Image (cartoon, grey):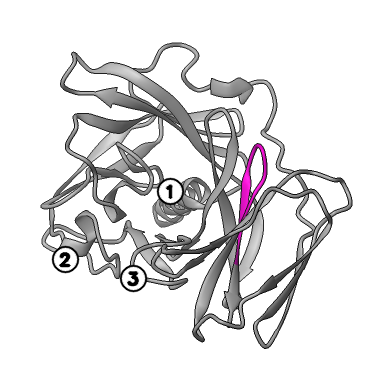
Amino acid sequence: MKKLSILFLLLISVSVQAQLNNLEDNTYWFRYSVNVLDSESIEGEDCLFIKGDTIINKINYKKLFYKDYYTDYYCSIREKDNKIYAVIPNYPYNGLEEILLYDFNVKVGDTIKSNATEGALSRLPVVESIDTIVLENNEKRKRFWLSYGGPWIEGIGHVYDLLFDVFEHPTNGIITELVCCRKNEVVYYKNHKLCEEDCCSMFGVGVSPIQIPENKVKIYTNSGKVKITFPDNKESKVLIVTDIIGNKKLETEQFTDNIYNLDLSGFKNGIYILTVKYKKYTDSYKIVR
C-alpha cells in the first residue's frame, strides 16, 4: 500500500508539471517596460499570448502573438520533453531554424547548449543553482539561476520576458519585466513588486480571449513570380519582403485588392520572409526563391 501511495503521488506530480509546461491557447505573459534608472517607473505595457496552430518544416507549433494597442504575430513555439523551442521570423543568422529557448531538465553544473545566435543563450550559460518557488495557485516550481541570463521559472520562462535570453538588449535603462503569467483564468505567476490587481487583465484580456482574424492567405510561387490571394474583405495592407537576416528587399504601397503579384525574379535563390502588414496586426510567411 505504501508503494502504491508513493507511485500515486509521483503520477500526480508528473501530471501537474506536464499540464503547466504544455503550451496551450489562451496562455498569456503580461509585461511591463520598466525604467530602472528612474525608480523603476513603468514606461509601457504589453503581453504575449498563444492562439492557434501552425506547421513549420513538418513540425506542429503554437502561434505566439504580441499585443499592445495592436496585435502582431511574433513567433511559433512548441514544447517537447520539458524543453521549449521557437521559430522566430527574421532572427539574426538563423533563417527558419528552431531555437532552444528552455530546457527544464538541466541540473546544477550543466551547460545549456542552445543554437541561439545572440543573447545570453548564445554564451552557453551554466546552471549555477536551482531552488523552488510556490506559484500563485500553490504549485511548486523549480527556479534556475544561470551564469548568463535567467532566472527561469519552470513552465513559466524568464522572469523578464519569455524570449529574453535569445536577444541582445539596449543599455538605456529600459527593460521588460514579466508581471503575470496566466492560462485561461488560472494565474500561475505574479510579480508582486510591480503587479497591481489588474495586471493580469490588460487590454481587456480578463474579459474575453483576444480574437485573431482567420487567416486565408494563399501564396503561389513559380520561378520568382509570386501570386498572393487574400480574403475578399478589402482590408488595406502592405507587403514587405526581407531576407533571412532581416534586410528589407521590397515594400509595396498600401493596397486593398485581394490578389497581388510580386516579381522576385531578380532576387538571388534562397529563403525570404514575406510580411503582410495590416492595420492592426501582421502575418509572416516563408518564400523559397
Point out residue 90 in the picture as x, y percentages from the top left corner: 44, 62
Residue type at mark 2: give it: Thr
State the separation of the CA atoms marked 3 and 2.
22 Å
Stretch in magenta:
276-285
State the separation of the CA atoms marked 2 and 1.
26 Å
Residue type at mark 3: give it: Tyr
Residue type at mark 1: give it: Ser
Can residue 280 be found in the magenta stretch? Answer: yes
Q: Which residue is mark 2?
A: 111
Q: Is residue 80 above or below residue 57?
A: above
The residue lying toward the viewer, choosing from 242 and 153, is: 242
- Residue at (53, 80) in percent of width and height: 267
N-term-proximal mark, 1 vs 3:
1
Neighbour class for label 2 at 10 Å: few (<14), some, many (≥20)?
some
Give the total number of marks visible in the rendering.
3
Q: Secondary structure at mark 3?
A: loop
Q: Is residue 106 above or below residue 44?
A: below
